[in-house]
């Protein structure tokens, strides 16, 4: 393998013969050249880079590389620096005519920006406990068992409220030693499976037994309305799920608005705090783009290693 010199005295070569050497020779400092060399070799590999290699890179390659770095747990600043190196390199290759369009153009490939971080979406553990405490003291056995099942499903499965409302007993299947929820209708339009933890299975079974004990006829949809109106006994709607969450957050005396979707954020945050890897969280929450998952990690990073932690007044 031919070693590429990063010395400022290296002779300029035609871009078609040595794209990387041409790019590095145009940098002002040795430190900058070494940083670019490291980043570009990581992307292309350690061998010599040809014009064919450069022309073969697509937008999808850049996005996959970015997501791969995120999956490895690289810091936001590191990912953005490496993306900046690619953008600068391909900008020069575009100007030199090696490629027609910059595949790493800023308008196409977004880095991880601080303003993308999701803040305040998860429910604090103390608030979560207060909500569960309110459910536990409900007098009516059926209402209590239904709502405990709903909250456990949202917290452990990270389902959207429409997915909770549409859950059916026939969608719960055994896959070896695991209980799985088959979601036939998802946001992506593709059927997906969600693992059901044993604690969730317990509360679902408790709710089902209570339904039967109270003489409710068997039906496929899991969660039904228990309101004393025309909706009684009919499947809950996604708006009903939100109203249930709202009812308990108010009775718990929480001074901030809690929604059903916040349980999905909480599922993600608690998984991260428990040590789950980005790819595991992405798979469980069914995020199409890993970038969505990484926003939660960035938020935890921002809070766990915060500038204010270093302040001392004595």
Image: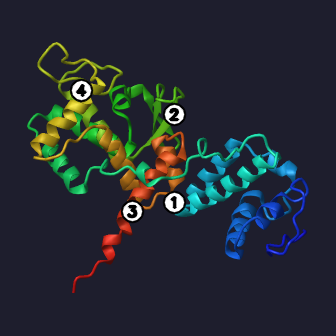
Crowd tier of the residue under label 1, counting other residues whose Cα lies within 10 Å: few below 14, some 14–19, many 20 or above: some
Q: Which residue is mark 1?
A: 76
> Which label sits in the foreground, 2 or 4?
4
The answer to whether 172 appears left or right of 59 in the picture is left
Q: Counting residues from the N terminus, which is met first, the one under dot 4 or under dot 3?
A: 4
Q: Which residue is mark 4?
A: 240
Instruction: Tell me the element at label 1.
Output: helix
> Which label sits in the foreground, 1 or 4?
1
Q: Is residue 307 above or below residue 291?
A: below
Instruction: Tell me the element at label 3.
Output: helix
Q: Which residue is mark 2?
A: 192
The x and y percentages for residue 11 are 88, 69
Q: Is residue 181 above or below residue 198?
A: above
Q: Counting residues from the N terminus, which is met first, the one under dot 1 or under dot 4?
A: 1
Q: Counting residues from the N terminus, which is met first, the one under dot 3 or under dot 2?
A: 2
Crowd tier of the residue under label 4, counting other residues whose Cα lies within 10 Å: few below 14, some 14–19, many 20 or above: some
- Alpha carbon of mark 2 to alpha carbon of mark 4: how far? 24 Å
The x and y percentages for residue 162 are 36, 28
Q: Is residue 238 above or below residue 270?
A: above
């Amino acid at each position: 393998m031919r070693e590429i010199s990063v010395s400022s005295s290296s002779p300029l070569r035609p871009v078609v013969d040595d794209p990387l050497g041409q790019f590095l020779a145009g940098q002002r400092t040795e430190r900058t050249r070494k940083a670019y060399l490291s980043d570009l070799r990581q992307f292309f590999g350690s061998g010599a880079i040809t014009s064919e290699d450069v022309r073969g890179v697509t937008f999808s390659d850049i996005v996959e590389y970015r997501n791969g770095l995120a999956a490895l747990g690289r810091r936001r600043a590191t990912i953005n620096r490496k993306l900046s190196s690619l953008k600068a390199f391909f900008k020069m290759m575009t100007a030199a005519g090696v490629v027609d369009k910059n595949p790493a153009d800023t308008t196409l490939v977004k880095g991880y920006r601080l303003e993308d971080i999701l803040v305040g979406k998860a429910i604090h553990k103390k608030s979560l406990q207060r909500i569960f405490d309110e459910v536990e003291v409900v007098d009516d056995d059926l209402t209590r068992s239904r709502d405990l099942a709903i909250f456990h499903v949202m917290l452990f499965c990270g389902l959207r409220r429409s997915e909770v409302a549409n859950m059916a007993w026939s969608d719960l299947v055994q896959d070896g030693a695991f209980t799985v929820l088959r979601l036939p209708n998802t946001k992506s339009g593709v059927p997906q499976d969600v693992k059901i933890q044993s604690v969730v299975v317990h509360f679902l079974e408790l709710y089902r037994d209570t339904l039967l004990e109270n003489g409710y006829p068997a039906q496929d949809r899991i969660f039904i309305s228990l309101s004393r109106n025309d909706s009684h006994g009919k499947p809950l709607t996604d708006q009903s799920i939100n109203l249930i969450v709202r009812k308990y957050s108010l009775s718990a005396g929480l001074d901030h608005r809690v929604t059903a979707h916040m349980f999905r954020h909480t599922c993600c945050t608690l998984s991260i705090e428990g040590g789950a890897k980005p790819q595991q969280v992405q798979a469980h929450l069914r995020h199409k783009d890993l970038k969505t998952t990484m926003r939660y990690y960035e938020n935890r990073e921002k809070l766990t290693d915060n500038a204010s932690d270093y302040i001392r007044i004595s």
